Amino acid sequence: MTNQRNTFIWTVEKDVDNLAESHHIQEAAERLIQNEVVAFPTETVYGLGGNAQSDKAIDRIFQAKGRPSDNPLIVHIAKRDDVKRYVEKTNELGEKLINAFWPGPLTLVFRHNGRLSTKVTAGLDTVGIRMPDHPVALAVIEASGLPIAAPSANTSGRPSPTTAVHVQEDLRGKIAGIVDGGATGVGLESTVVDCTGEEPMILRPGGITKEQLEAVVGKVAVDPSLAEEKEAPRSPGMKYTHYAPKAEMTLVDGSDRFFQEQIDEANRKGLNVGILVPVEKSETFSGMRRKEICGTESDISTVARELYGALRSFDSGEAVDVIFARTVGEAALGQAVMNRLRKAAGNRVLTENELQK
Ligand code: TXA
Ligand code: MG
């Protein structure tokens, strides 16, 4: 194959005291300084990092992921105060959120001061910044001495990676290296909050919930286009399909009987069926070729953590034609889980009619 390159794998223990002195961390940082791109774990998902001040490094990120260049990247920093180096000014709202949630799965959008590559911001006058809550991510960023742009380390359109193996599946041979620090924690990306307006607005639900944000800053708005997705027609809009397994996925909102009917109907059409259900429903249904268990209904954080791995697993092993996934409640982290499920399903949702129940 042309353009194949050797991708180093550096395995590190995230809990050791002298992480900063690790040769592996130093080597990964060296590559970043050379404007190469390197994947590393964060508390949300693995990121594909590159020097946010280098056009060349940013080109490499977009190229490795096959990402459209009009989608801006998040800049990762190792110290809270570093935000001031790249933004025009922070405001009271931003300061409150930084103090409450950094390091953590919260990306804040501010007006930038022009010190980052324009390719990072896709030409916008704002930039999304976060300080990740993961010792390996912080050690790599700190050792590089650079602001690190890092989108999720997956091929554009596929589920984000929550293990180094997922990164290898997508990017091996295309990037300089992968720091393997084990499985990530939250399992879904950071919450993105726009701090440039009068009131904060959630642009992407994620690891920090709306309830958590509101406890600190009062009312938080949600980008109206997120709510509209709920009402979107069943026919798939391709632009909404992200995080998606290769087989067509449909969300099923209703009783167990209604879910079983979907499996039976697909079987009558001669389709091979896969299902994505929580452990409580692992023995409830029949007639499917494949079953992926994703977390427990009694703890939504386990569903978040296991979701991308479960979606990815449908792409290996026995192929199915269609996947039915159970919807989850939208409280707390459920909002981010449902956002990703809807995108993975291209907005196909079958809702049981009240009369059918
Ligand atoms: O948890 C995360 O945020 C992970 C880890 C690696 O940190 N990163 C991540 O990056 O999810 P990415 O590139 O896959 O998603 C970035 C999201 C996109 O939805 C992008 O449109 C939005 O953040 N974004 C970035 N900069 C923005 C800006 N200036 N204004 C509005 N949205 C922005
Ligand atoms: Mg992504």
Image: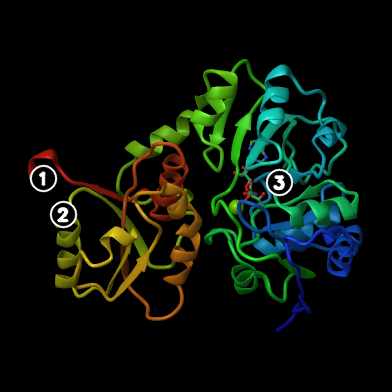
The alpha-carbon separation of the residues under discs 2 and 1 comes to: 8 Å
Find residue 258 and name its label. Answer: 2
Q: Quadrant of the C terminus?
A: top left
Cα distance in 3D space between marks 3 and 2: 41 Å
Q: Nearer the viewer, residue 185 or 231?
A: 185
Residue sitting at 17 percent across and 46 percent down?
Answer: 352
Residue holding disc 1: 357
**Type of amino acid at the residue the image marks with label 1:** Lys
255, 185: nearer the viewer:
185
Which comes sooner in the sequence, label 2 or label 1? 2
> What element does badge 3 sit on?
loop
The dot on residue 132 is 3
Give the label, 3 or 2, closer to the camera. Answer: 3
Q: Which one is earlier in the sequence, the residue at label 1 or at label 3? A: 3
Quadrant location of the N terminus in the rendered image = bottom right
The quadrant in which residue 325 appears is bottom left
Quadrant in the rendering for residue 24: bottom right
Q: Amino acid at mark 2?
A: Phe
The image quarter in which residue 351 lies: top left
Q: Is residue 323 left or right of residue 183?
A: left
SS type, badge 1 = loop
Q: Dividing the image into four quarters, tell me where ligand 1 lies.
A: top right
Tag 2–tag 1 contact (CB < 8 Å)? yes
